[in-house]
Image (cartoon, helix red, strand yellow):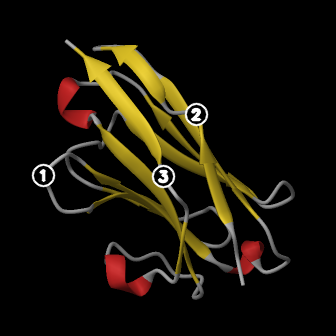
Amino acid sequence: QVQLVESGGGLVQAGGSLRLSCAASGRTFSSYAMGWFRQAPGKEREFVAAINWSGDSTDYADSVKGRFTISRDNAKNTVYLQMNILKPEDTAVYYCAARTRGIISTRIYEYTYWGQGTRVTVSS
């Protein structure tokens, strides 16, 4: 069993930055691919970014490419999402997720463990 706890959300003005963190419990973190997803009010949850078990492969949604960066520190059992040049349309609850396979995926159903989410609000 893996427990994920997100932090770092908040209110920021458009053009600003935030860094989300996701702390994972368990000794198997370093073998899992990790992803960030988000859900805006009235919309379905969508893929944002993913990173493989070793951190040398990443993938991003087109809407965040060039602005967001996913990274991980396996020694700290933590995955990060650095968000720059934030836009009002980035407003959502952001979720961290773990996939028991080490290869990245953009598909929600391929992730087994989920955090409770952290809210990000970007004002215009």
Q: Which numbered disc, 1 or 2, marks the residue closer to the eye?
A: 1
> What x and y, as percent, mark residue 12?
39, 16
Kind of residue at disc 3: Gly
Q: Which residue is mark 2?
A: 8
Indicate whether 41 appears above or below 32: above
- Indicate which disc residue 62 carries: none
Q: Give the Cα separation between the discs numbered 1 and 3.
A: 16 Å
Q: Earlier in the sequence, mark 1 or mark 2?
A: 2
Q: Are marks 1 and 3 in contact (CB under 8 Å)?
A: no
- Circle 1 — which element? loop
Asked whether the residues under the numbered discs 3 and 2 touch, taking CB atoms below 8 Å apart as contact, a structural biologist would say no
Tag nearer the camera, 3 or 2: 3
Q: Residue at x 33, y 53 (%)?
A: 38
Q: Is residue 1 above or below residue 57?
A: below
Which residue lies at the image location 39% right of the left edge and 77% below the top edge? 105
Disc 2 marks a residue whose amino acid type is Gly
Mark positioned earlier in the residue sequence (3 or 2):
2
Residue 104 coordinates in the image, percent (x, y): 47, 75
**Residue 99 image offset from top left, x and y in percent:** 54, 80
Q: In the image shown, does 21 or 73 lie closer to the viewer?
A: 21
Q: Nearer the viewer, residue 4 or 31?
A: 4
Q: Quadrant of the N terminus?
A: bottom right
- Residue farthest to the left? 42
Q: Name the side, left or right, on which 46 lies relative to 32.
A: left
At label 3, counting other C-alpha atoms closer than 10 Å, the crowd grade (few under 14, some 14-19, many 20 or more) is: many
- The quadrant of the picture occupied by the C terminus is top left
Res 117 label: 3
Identify the amino acid type marked 1.
Gly
